[in-house]
Amino acid sequence: MKQALPRQTDIVVIGGGMAGLSAASRLHQCGVEVRLIEAQARVGGRVYSEKDDHGQPIELGAQAFNRDMRILARAARTHGLQRAPLHHQGKVVFDGIEQAQAKTAIERLEALLDGNDPEFNALAGNPDSSLADAVDLLSPDDQSRQMMDSYVQELWGRPMDRLQLAHAVEISKRFDSSRDDWEFQLVEGFGALAERMAATLGDRLVLGAPVTRIEAQPEEVTVTSLCGSIRTKAAIIAVPPTVARHFMPDQHWSQNALSTFEAGDLIKVVVQYDETFWRRKGYSGESISVKRPGFATADGTLADGGRPTLLVFIGGVQARAISALSSEQRRLRIRSILITLFGEAAGNPTGWYERNWIDEPWVGGAYTAHVSPGTMLEPDAVLRRFESGITFACAEIAARFPGYVEGAMQEGWQAAERVLSGLNHAVEAKPSEQRLWSRFKRALGA
């Protein structure tokens, strides 16, 4: 039986992902009466953990973090969770390109996004410009350009011509760390963190309650869901823009900003084996592909006795093409690629877990959504406003670590602060503490 909503509460948080959990937890700590409404029967959003037949967590969503992601690390410690290092040692497989050329291509892309060239600045100030337009300034050879596009498709789930340049520059700057993002994972899984945060909310959390409509009046907001309607002083919309725009009023101040975002495309596969055969051959388990844009792998084996695990990430155009295959065809295709990359042993998995995030109805896609060319500049700044009882919180608009769990959690906290300040509650303000990075940079020796 669905849990009924009360008729009224102080603040409503919509979305039980890491941003929503962070916002609701902060409000609860401040003694505010809050309700967190989640559409699904689970919390976590893009955090999604299962268990294999040995009880080991299988991360089919978010998985990695680094030591500069302090909000996440502190929450994990608070809830009694342990971190474990991710494996890095060994050679990287470069599929269709030499390591030196791949490294140079990524370094040129990085330098471009950091550049102050007048021609680049003119492009970056034009909302119609794409990242592909900026790469044209470099006049790269075909293979180097393919490397850049493959890198971007895996990292952001969209090809370069479907990413607004100004947006790409901003999210690059906001990666607030010089460290690799692929340092640690949680022994118990990210899902355990989401569940333990949710447990502190008790009956303030309502699951299985998709929101269908928001009505924002000057002094009151009404949130209507499949579990009923609730009146509130303010609402924090803690779902991705690609989801929020479907239930926000057509003429709402947020709609122009929400409509700029396009969901990323990602398929993630966790493949288990009897042994870490790639390590025996001197490989790290990581691969970067030019032949298959957006296809990448990494070693996800849990330290100290975890089952040997290769992670497969398929982003962008190829993800959407592979998602159209049947489950069996998709498995055969991915297995064939793994054999090409790592040898025949890769064709004998003992466990196979897959999550297709494309067009996922409650989160819109993965890893995150991005701004499309031809739309407004800086829509995230619009969505971080608190106006007429509404503000937004999601990884997409995070001022630090956008697209990461850390960014989602920080933005949830910041959204709670905006609402509390707007409603004249006293709350301690903490200063927020920038760069594009990925495990590939370390793999490339950068």
Image (tube, grey):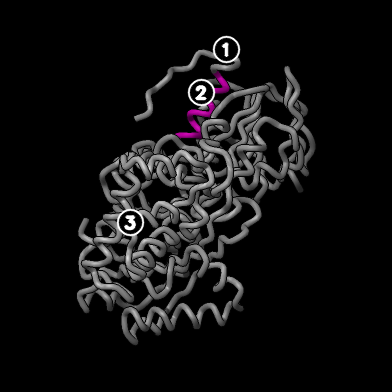
339 horizontally vs 415: left or right = left
Cα distance in 3D space between marks 3 and 1: 51 Å
Numbered disc total:
3
Q: Position of residue 392 (x, y in %)?
A: 58, 33
Tell me the chief SS of the magenta region. helix
User: 262 and 246: which one is in front?
Assistant: 262
Pointer 1 or 2: first along the chain: 2
Per the rendered image, the range of residues in magenta is 409-420
Location of mark 3 (residue): 138
Q: Secondary structure at mark 3?
A: loop
Q: Position of residue 339 (x, y in %)?
A: 37, 83
Cα distance in 3D space between marks 3 and 2: 43 Å
261 horizontally vs 444: left or right = right
In which image quadrant can residue 206 be found? top right
**Which class describes the residues within 10 Å of circle 2: few (<14), some (14-19), or many (20+)?**
many
Pointer 3 or 1: first along the chain: 3
In this rendering, the label closer to the viewer, 3 or 1: 3
Give the farthest residue toward the bottom.
344
| Disc number placed over residue 424 in the picture, else none | 1
Q: What residue is at 76 percent from the left and 48 percent from the top?
A: 1
Cα distance in 3D space between marks 1 and 2: 10 Å
**Which class describes the residues within 10 Å of circle 3: few (<14), some (14-19), or many (20+)?**
few
| Disc number placed over residue 417 in the picture, else none | 2
Question: Compared with residue 291, is residue 382 higher up or lower down, i.e. above or below?
Answer: above
- Can residue 13 be found in the magenta stretch? no
Q: Amino acid at mark 3?
A: Leu
Q: Amino acid at mark 1?
A: Asn
Q: Amino acid at mark 2?
A: Glu
Q: Secondary structure at mark 2?
A: helix
